[in-house]
Amino acid sequence: MKYRIEHDSLGEVKVPGSKYWGAQTERSRNNFKIGPESTMPGEIIKAFGYVKKAAAIANFELGVLSEEKKELIVNVCEEIIEGKLDDQFPLVIWQTGSGTHTNMNVNEVIVNRAHVKNGGKLTDKIKILHPNDDVNKSQSSNDTFPTAMHIAAYKSAEEITIPGMLKLRDILASKSDEYMHIVKVGRTHLMDAVPLTLGQEISGYVRQIDNGIRAIRSALVMISELALGGTAVGTGLNTPEGYSELAARKIAELTGFPFVSASNKFESLAANDAMVELSGALKRSAVSLMKIANDVRLLSSGPRSGIHEIIIPENEPGSSIMPGKANPSQAEALAMVCSQVIGNDVAVTIGGSNGNLELNVFKPLVAVNVLQSARLLGDACSSFSENCISGIKPDYDSIKTHLDNNLMLVTALNPYIGYDKSARIARKAYTEKITLRDAAIKLGLVTGEQFDKWIAPEKMAGLSVKRKSD
């Protein structure tokens, strides 16, 4: 490979000749060879494109950057945002905890790409832009990286997580309405309980997802606050007056999201509490979705030796040895995603709690885990919706069999004969393997007419009309 010589404050560095990055990027690339597949997420790089573009525009409007330099920076930032320079960002997550190396990687790429676009050569000693004095003007890694974190997290939640969850929520809501009349056995402690309808059961899942979305959107309020303008420690050193607010407004205009300048830059640099809150909201949703996935697995178990009250789509063969077997693979995938998100939140919690004095230096760790959680949840919800929930159907025969055999229907007799006598009926029916009706009549506690009048599964489930037949 051909190399060129680049310089930074420590001296000369050999850099691959065709690459746009410079000396500081190359030093990091050589010093942090950690993990084969752990480069900084593209969402962060694209967010940096917005940060550098907005900063250049604000600096120009405030009179500290020339129009020519502003245009050069803006043009390269647009290429970064469009993903045209993705191969120019080789650095791994596991670097300096402030994200300084990635910030400088972006600065250097903008300088060298702008120089080439302007007719220069990568080997030129003097470039039309300077990575620190021009591209990084009015900025520090300490305020640009957390700003990029927030932009990337907000966009991921709004464009991937919430749409995926809404898709699942809406399909479940339609299933709940469709199956609201189907009375089935309720179960508590995994044991038979009083009846409810399949639609009522599913409505609980809908509410869980609604609550998860509410929590995520609530967390995004703090994510919308940007650290840009705090520079090194939060004092705003080396920024022109009005820069923080103007740069935040420019980012809001460029992204279409309601970003604002953080009211206290000391907090936004020294802590990652907003990201911790968002991670917690994502974990909350993962906990809910894990419950939903596991319920689907239980309710579809069988087909002959399990509960099998719902039939799920058979998407692929379920075994390499057992012919005809099909598995709840989409529910399993969702459950694994939820496990990963819950684990990610542990890493974010540890990272967020380790801010020292004026800077938290776990920013790359926090950013990567939140972004992975946001994407995984959104993608998994979409897959679960399309490949499982949309195709769910009730197994009416299983539902009726389980309901007819449910000893807990005896609960409806409590108001008439009391708990103890009702328990005797249930115990006799269970031990002698007879129906509740026969047991009640044998014990002489109720007549057949009374039993038929008082035990009505539809009424027990809160329905005012009788259950529809298959």
Image (spheres, grey):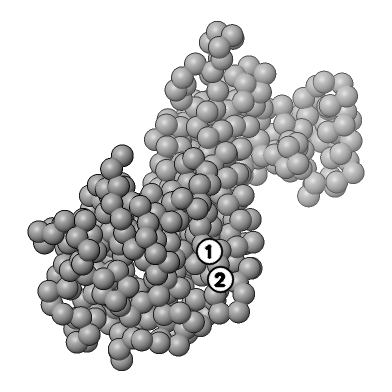
* Mark 1 crowdedness (10 Å alpha carbons): few <14, some 14-19, many ≥20: some
Residue 347 location in percent, x, y?
61, 56
- Which residue is nearer to you in this view: 441 or 279? 279
Element type at mark 1: loop
Q: Which residue matches tag 1? A: 97
Rendering quarter of residue 198: top right
* Mark 2 crowdedness (10 Å alpha carbons): few <14, some 14-19, many ≥20: many
Residue 452 marker:
none
The residue lying at 62 percent from left, 74 percent from top is 356
The residue lying at 45 percent from left, 73 percent from top is 142
The residue lying at 56 percent from left, 79 percent from top is 358
- Which residue is nearer to you in this view: 449 or 206? 206
The residue lying at 56 percent from left, 15 percent from top is 319
- Which residue is nearer to you in this view: 332 or 253? 253
Find the residue positioned furthest to the left: 119
Rendering quarter of residue 135: bottom left
Would you say the residues marked 1 and 2 are in contact, meaning their CB atoms lie under 8 Å apart? yes
Rendering quarter of residue 54: bottom left
Q: Where is 299 relative to 249, above or below? A: above
Q: Which residue matches tag 2? A: 360
Mark 1 residue type:
Gly
N-terminal of the pair, mark 1 or mark 2, is 1
In this orientation, does residue 70 appear? yes
